[in-house]
Amino acid sequence: MNQFEPKFTLIDTVSNQSVVLEQKQINIYLCGPTVYNDLHLGNTRPLIVFDVLQRVLQAAQYKVQFVQNITDIDDKIIKIAQQQEISEAQLCKQQITAYKSLLKKLNILPIKHLQVTDKIDKMPGYIARLVQMGFAYVSPLGNTYFSVSQLPQYGILANRVVETIEDEATDKRNKLDFVLWKQTTAGVKWNSPWGWGRPGWHVECAFLIDYSFKDQLTIHGGGVDLKFPHHENENAMHMALYDKPLTQHWMHIGHLMFENQKMSKSLQNFLLAVDFLTIHDFRILRWLFYQKHYYHPLDLSQSLIEQACSDIKRIQKAVNVCRTWFVYSEQSAIPAPKQFEPVFKALLNNLNFANAITHIWKLVKQINHDVSKQNLSGLKEHLSHLEWALNILGIGFKSIHTKLNVQLIKKWASLRKNGQLDKADEVRQKLIKKGLL
């Protein structure tokens, strides 16, 4: 029998090519939040998808370095700080605390976060290289722009041909040119060779990738809406400096839709993640995102949420009932999670959530059958596999088999064995109410 050697297969969302990750060091950069208010549900989809990616890679013995930016200077931040009559730093501190709290609530594994303002002093040097190499220019108004017409490869991510489009409304030479450093009198500012101002959004991410990985980035990801212009512009700067793509592979996550429209703050059709989590368990949100492949849009509806609630309750009940029968049968220990190859192979195949979920339901069905037959050997195997599958998806359940609950289960077992069936049934009803049966 051939030994299973786990390797991750990725379908690059730019080239559409299937690639096997052969190297064991995987460097990941995921575009992070601009911290001016709370995240809506659509913002959490890339976080949860990349969290599963990290879990799968680690289970497959890859070494993972996962970096995410936190954009803590932006026009929106300045505007809201002024409205609230606090500093940009105060606003960002509040929002960063809220963001990291949300990550814990969503059961996201640790990520290395880089705040933009901590590295701004190094960004003028990065921009100066682009100016010196002829890929950027300083406008008559003192703003510094990247000149897209100087880079033949510009447009490769979006698969579009770039034409020179004059922009008389601004000081840019080409409408598609993007700002690297802008002069400003509003909000917090930094000094540079081009005067006081601050960097543009695109250069912030490009610099942080360069700072963290140089030219060794394996996977760059974010929402599909970032593909153009944000990722295109990041890639352009890297191509200009190094004559090679910014990353080896791209992963773009599909939109979260609401009533067939993209969920967004601009359309005012969003639900904040923190509000969702006051009503629902985090596992329900994660389970929702596993209903479609990560690249495809997911249309959120009340019926889909209700189905996810029902699914999670069914899975949790199977786990709890199984654990109860181990206590009832006086087993010394509940089996530890054990790698379940069908789910692992599904997730190694470009995070094939559909196949992974199919195998999870098969395990639940097997567990329910084992319980009905009181098949302890089957329960041991199937519970250990189910626990592993749930953990790698980030939705494992903590044990509710407290000391008092274990005592109650043992009392039920004793009453049944002694033929005191009426009293045993009273205890059984209590166990059902507690979710133990």
Image (spheres, rainbow, N blue to C red):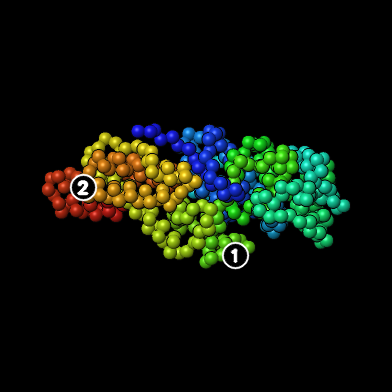
Is the residue 216 above or below the residue 386 in the image? above
The percent position of residue 296, horizontal first and vertical second, equals 52, 56
**Marks 1 & 2, CB-CB < 8 Å contact:** no
Residue type highlighted by circle 1: Gln
Q: Residue 69 location, x and y as percent?
A: 63, 44
Residue 314 lies in quadrant = bottom left
Q: Position of residue 190 (x, y in %)?
A: 78, 44
Q: Residue at x 21, y 45 (%)?
A: 374
Residue placed under numbered mark 2 in the picture: 373
Q: Is residue 98 visible?
A: no
Q: Dot 1 corresponds to which residue? A: 268
What distance separates the C-alpha of mark 1 from that of mark 2? 52 Å
Relative to 211, is 383 on the left or the right? left
Taking the image as shown, residue 40 lies to the left or right of residue 317, namely right
247 or 289, which is in the foreground?
A: 247
Residue placed at 83% from the left, 42% from the top? 193
Dot 2 lies on which element? helix
Asked if residue 303 can be seen in this view, the reply is yes
Crowdedness of circle 1 by 10 Å Cα count: few (<14), some, many (20+)? few
Category of crowding for the residue at label 2, using alpha-carbon neighbours closer than 10 angstroms: few (below 14), some (14–19), many (at least 20): few
Marked residue nearer the N-terminal end (1 or 2)? 1
Residue 365 badge: none
The kind of secondary structure element at disc 1 is: loop
Report the residue that reaches farthest toward the bottom: 259
**On-image quarter of the N terminus:** top left
